[in-house]
């Protein structure tokens, strides 16, 4: 990545963020190593076109290529879907990626966003919400014809007492307000992963964070009706 292009991307991203919301969750930064290779593979894929649906996120989204592979094949393969998830990503990394090629010249019908859980150890609920808001603004500016489906950050931890789950729930309560019911839509499917008492079954999230195949099935089935609506099916 040439320095001038890198700087341009950062300036564009920051221009979408209010001065009082500039912090670690909104300041775009790249990562290195295998992350760079995966990011560049996304750029090569979108350059080929034929992207009607994109999923943006972290390792939980990347997991569609692992435990969620069969579920993806069933629900999304025929929809020309592209997985733009990278394990370990936080909101600031996604902001950088979206300004550095991941959305280049594509016009997907819908974009699904689920990001923020990796921020919950270092950022407040409000800061995570700021980061997600910046991502939504990027999508609206770069892909004005694309319908955005913003998902609440999935629950994590054994039960309702988990500190990072509480941070994520606080963020969800804030950024659900970003939905306008027209271009941006919000769904919180988190309760579908939980028992009635708020405990998180390991058959759904074996490590209390990442989904099993059953978890991906719940995800896909929970957004299917809304996705059909947004994609005009």
Image (tube, rainbow, N blue to C red):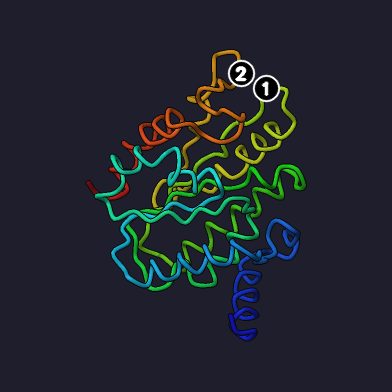
Q: Quadrant of residue 71?
A: top left
- The mark found on residue 199 in the picture is 2
Q: Give residue 151's position: percent from left, percent from top.
A: 50, 42
Q: Residue furthest left?
A: 233
Q: Is residue 39 above or below residue 120?
A: below
| Residue at image point 65% right, 41% down | 171
Q: Quadrant of residue 6?
A: bottom right
Q: Give residue 48's position: percent from left, percent from top.
A: 32, 71
Q: Is residue 136 above or below residue 30?
A: above
- The mark found on residue 160 in the picture is 1
**Left/right of residue 227 with respect to residue 31 in the rendered view:** left
Q: Residue furthest top?
A: 197
Q: Dot 2, how many residues are within 10 Å of its Cα: few (below 14), some (14-19), or many (20+)?
A: some
**Left/right of residue 1 with respect to residue 160 in the rendered view:** left
Q: Is residue 191 above or below residue 231?
A: above
Instruction: Kindly state the secondary structure of the residue where label 2 is placed.
Output: loop
Instruction: Name the N-terminal-most of marks 2 and 1.
Output: 1
Instruction: Kindly state the secondary structure of the residue where label 1 is placed.
Output: loop
| Residue at image point 57% right, 48% down | 115
């Amino acid at each position: 990545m040439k320095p001038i292009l890198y700087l341009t991307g950062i300036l564009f991203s920051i221009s979408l963020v209010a001065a009082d919301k500039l912090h670690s969750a909104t300041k775009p930064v790249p990562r290195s190593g295998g992350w760079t290779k995966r990011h560049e593979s996304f750029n090569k894929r979108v350059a080929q076109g034929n992207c009607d649906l994109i999923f943006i996120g972290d390792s939980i989204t990347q997991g569609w290529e692992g435990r969620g592979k069969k579920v993806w094949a069933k629900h999304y393969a025929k929809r020309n879907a592209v997985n733009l998830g990278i394990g370990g990503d936080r909101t600031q990394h996604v902001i950088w990626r979206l300004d550095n090629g991941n959305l280049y010249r594509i016009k997907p019908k819908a974009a699904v966003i689920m990001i923020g859980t990796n921020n919950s150890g270092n950022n407040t609920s409000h800061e995570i919400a700021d980061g997600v808001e910046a991502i939504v603004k990027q999508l609206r500016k770069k892909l004005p014809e694309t319908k955005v489906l913003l998902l609440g950050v999935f629950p994590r931890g054994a039960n309702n007492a988990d500190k990072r789950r509480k941070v994520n729930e606080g963020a969800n309560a804030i950024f659900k307000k970003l939905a306008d019911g027209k271009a941006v839509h919000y769904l919180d499917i988190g309760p579908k992963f939980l028992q009635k008492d708020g405990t998180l079954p390991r058959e759904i999230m074996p490590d209390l964070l990442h989904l099993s195949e059953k978890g991906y099935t719940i995800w896909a089935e929970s957004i299917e009706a809304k996705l059909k609506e947004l994609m005009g099916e």
